[in-house]
Image (cartoon, rainbow, N blue to C red):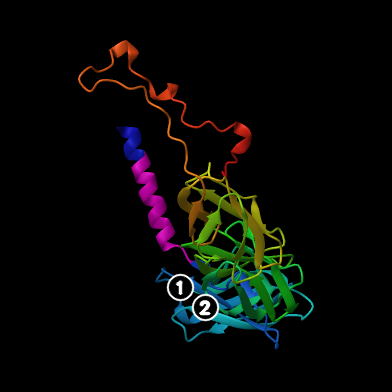
């Protein structure tokens, strides 16, 4: 109990002492945007709780590049001081600290004290975002970014997905919305040798996929052409279309992918010679699901024969035909091609 009381007393004493200390707070951002005059405002605030300190005696300084320069009072508030510092055009960073001199009256004379802050660093950045052409779009959209300080190796990243980026000059760049999951926001970041820059959020809407024809009428096993198209050229890696169907044993079609830089692809589909009715489902990341009705004309499928039995004399339990033992389809495995 005694130790606990001692700890509480020490903590209270430290808090009291910290509240009574003169402190220096740095209000200068760690990164400052570049300007043509190369003059930057350094700002600090001081806290002087002691009544013994003469308020009019506060003399603030900034020490940067080994030079000690006086600061003047700011209109931003009480005990806030600023200094306009002209920075060499060829440099992009500097280390600095603040000093505060003040007087304390004594019986015989005024005593001068000096308070020094810790060492700080600031960096001048010529990278600046002004605006995005759009903050919402679909996969394949080209979006322009206006700003300053762009470099040839800059790239736009959707969360962790790299987007195709083009930098015509240091004041403009363009990126293409990649095929990412739709109906959600992505954090955009500009990354390159000049550092990272937050571009904000971008919402990706589902993009449409078109087919021609929009419905399929297949005659037996005859092949029919079908084309798939999107609004914008796909990335250089191409766009794979995941094609599935609810009648996999009745139609056949090869894998489909739109080549890189293209907007469309042509392919063929054919039936297996039997009557069938169903749909094709075309999916891709960032795109709306496309459903294509399919009707296959052909010969009727054979119905498996079921042994005759009296309606009043059901099969004994041990003789009841099992579904797995019925020969449903007499076609060989070589005749069936399944779309996954």
Residue 337 location (% of width, % of height): 60, 41
Mark 1 or mark 2, which is nearer the start of the sequence? Answer: 1
Q: Quadrant of the rendered structure where residue 169 is?
A: bottom right
**Position of 291 compared to 222: left or right?**
left
Q: Is residue 161 above or below residue 221?
A: below
Q: Which residue sits at x=36%, y=19%?
A: 321
The answer to whether residue 108 shows anywhere in this view is: no
**Position of 254 compared to 74: left or right?**
right
Residue 4 location (% of width, % of height): 33, 36
Question: Which image quarter holds the N terminus?
Answer: top left
User: Marks 2 and 1, how far apart in space?
Assistant: 9 Å
For label 1, the residue is 53
Q: Quadrant of the rendered structure where residue 20 is?
A: bottom left
Instruction: Decide whether residue 8 is among the magenta residues.
Output: yes
The answer to whether residue 325 shows anywhere in this view is: yes
Q: Quadrant of the rendered structure where residue 134 is?
A: bottom right
Q: Which residue sits at x=54%, y=74%?
A: 44
> Disc 2 on helix, strand or loop?
loop
The magenta stretch is 7-22
Residue 310 location (% of width, % of height): 25, 20
User: Hey, which residue is sitting farthest right in the picture?
Assistant: 90
Q: Which mark is residue 58?
A: 2
Q: Nearer the viewer, residue 335 or 18?
A: 335
């Amino acid at each position: 109990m005694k130790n606990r009381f001692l700890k509480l007393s020490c903590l209270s004493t430290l808090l009291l002492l910290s509240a009574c200390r003169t402190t220096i707070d740095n209000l200068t951002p760690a990164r400052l945007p570049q300007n043509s005059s190369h003059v930057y405002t350094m700002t600090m605030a001081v806290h002087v709780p002691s009544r013994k300190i003469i308020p009019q005696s506060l003399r603030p300084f900034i020490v940067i590049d080994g030079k000690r320069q006086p600061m003047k009072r700011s209109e931003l508030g009480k005990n806030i001081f600023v200094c306009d510092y002209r920075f060499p055009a060829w440099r992009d960073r500097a280390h600095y600290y603040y000093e505060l001199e003040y007087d304390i009256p004594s019986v015989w004379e005024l005593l001068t004290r000096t308070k020094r802050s810790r060492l700080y660093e600031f960096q001048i950045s010529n990278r600046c975002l002004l605006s995005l052409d759009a903050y919402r779009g679909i996969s394949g959209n080209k979006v322009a970014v206006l700003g300053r300080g762009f470099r040839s190796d800059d790239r736009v990243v959707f969360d962790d997905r790299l987007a195709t980026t083009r930098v015509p000059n240091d004041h403009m760049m363009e990126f293409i919305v990649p095929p990412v999951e739709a109906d959600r926001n992505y954090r955009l970041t500009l990354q390159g040798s000049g550092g990272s820059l937050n571009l904000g959020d971008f919402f990706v809407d589902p993009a449409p996929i078109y087919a021609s024809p929009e419905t399929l009428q297949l005659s037996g096993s005859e092949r029919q052409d079908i084309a798939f198209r999107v609004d914008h050229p796909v990335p250089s890696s191409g766009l794979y279309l995941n094609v599935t169907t609810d009648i996999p044993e009745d139609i056949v079609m090869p894998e489909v992918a739109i080549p890189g830089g293209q907007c469309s692809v042509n392919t063929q589909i054919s039936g297996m010679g039997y009557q069938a009715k169903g749909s094709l489902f075309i999916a891709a990341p960032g795109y709306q699901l496309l459903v294509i009705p399919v009707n296959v004309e052909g010969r009727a499928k054979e119905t498996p024969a079921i042994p005759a039995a009296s309606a009043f004399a059901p099969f004994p339990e041990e003789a009841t035909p099992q579904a797995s033992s019925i020969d449903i389809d007499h076609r060989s495995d070589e005749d069936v091609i399944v779309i996954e």
